[in-house]
Image (cartoon, rainbow, N blue to C red):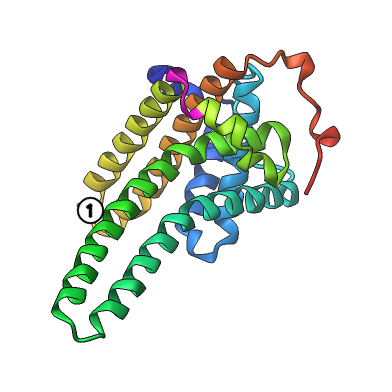
Amino acid sequence: MISESLSYLRGSEDLWRTVIIGGILSLFGFLIVPLFAITGYLVRVLDRTASGNDEAPGFEDWSELIVEGAKASVIMFIYAFVPVIVLIAFALSAGLLGSTGSDILGTIGGLGIFVGMLLWLGLSLLAAYAIPAALANFAEKRTLVSGFEVKTMRRVLMDKTYATGWLMAFLVIIGGAVVSGLLNVIPILGFIAGAFVGFYAIVAAYYIIGHTWADIEQIPIRDRPEPQEQAQI
C-alpha cells in the first residue's frame, strides 16, 4: 500500500500542476485560506480513493474546495483543541493551588501539571489517530456532524484495519518529514522544496486512509451519494 500511495500523484496527468499548486499553497499556509484549499484537496482524495477511483483530483472548483476544506478544518480544530483545554484546566488548577502558599498544595499542583501534560500527550495522540477517520467520514457524508459520529468513530478506531492503515500513513508522513528536514540543510531553497515534499507525502498518506476507509466500510460505489445530493451544513 505504501508503494502504491507514493505512485498515486505520479500517475496523474496533472502531476506537476498539482504538486506545484500544493507546494505553493503550503508555503503560504500562514494565510489560513491556502490551508483550507489543501484540506479540501485531501477531502477529495479521500472521497475518490474510498470510492475506488485512483485518479488523483485536480485543483479546480476553488470555491467549493475552500468551503469543504474550511469545514474539514473545523473538525480537525475541535479534535486538536480538546487536549489543549485539558492541559489549560490542569495548569490553572495547579496555579490556584500554588498560590495558596501551602507546600502540600503546591506539591499537589506540581503533580497536577505533570498529570495534565501526560493527559495532553495521550489525548493529542488520540486526536491524531482519530482525525483521518473523522475526515474520511466527512468526505463520505459531507456534514460537520459526521466528523463526530460516536458510533461510527468508535467502530472504526477500534478496527485493526484502520490501525494498520493509519500506521502506514503515519510512516509516509514521517518519511516526508525526514526528507524535508534533510532538504532544510540548504538555506531557503531547502525550505521551499520541503513544502512540496510535505504536500506530496500527505496526499500519499490520505490515499492510504481512503483505501483503508473503503476496506472498513465496504460501501459500493453505486450506493454512495453524488456530491450535489449530499447534505450540507
Q: Name which residue lies at 72% across and 34% down.
A: 141
Q: Residue furthest left?
A: 103
199 shown above or below 162: below
Residue 232, x across and y down, in percent: 80, 44
- Left or right of residue 48, residue 64 in this image: right
Position of 5 with respect to 117 (left or right) is: right
**Magenta stretch holds residue 28:** no
* Image quadrant where one finds the N terminus: top left
Q: Does the rendering let one see residue 137?
A: yes
Name the residue beneath numbered marker 1.
186
Q: Depth check: give the residue in front, 203 or 146.
A: 146
Give the residues drawn in magenta, as a range. Answer: 157-161
State the image quarter where residue 86 is shown. bottom left
Residue at position x 53%, y 49% in the image: 76
Instruction: For label 1, count other residues whose C-alpha is less than 10 Å away and answer few (under 14), some (14-19) or many (20+).
Output: few
Residue 29 x, y percent position in the rendering: 49, 59
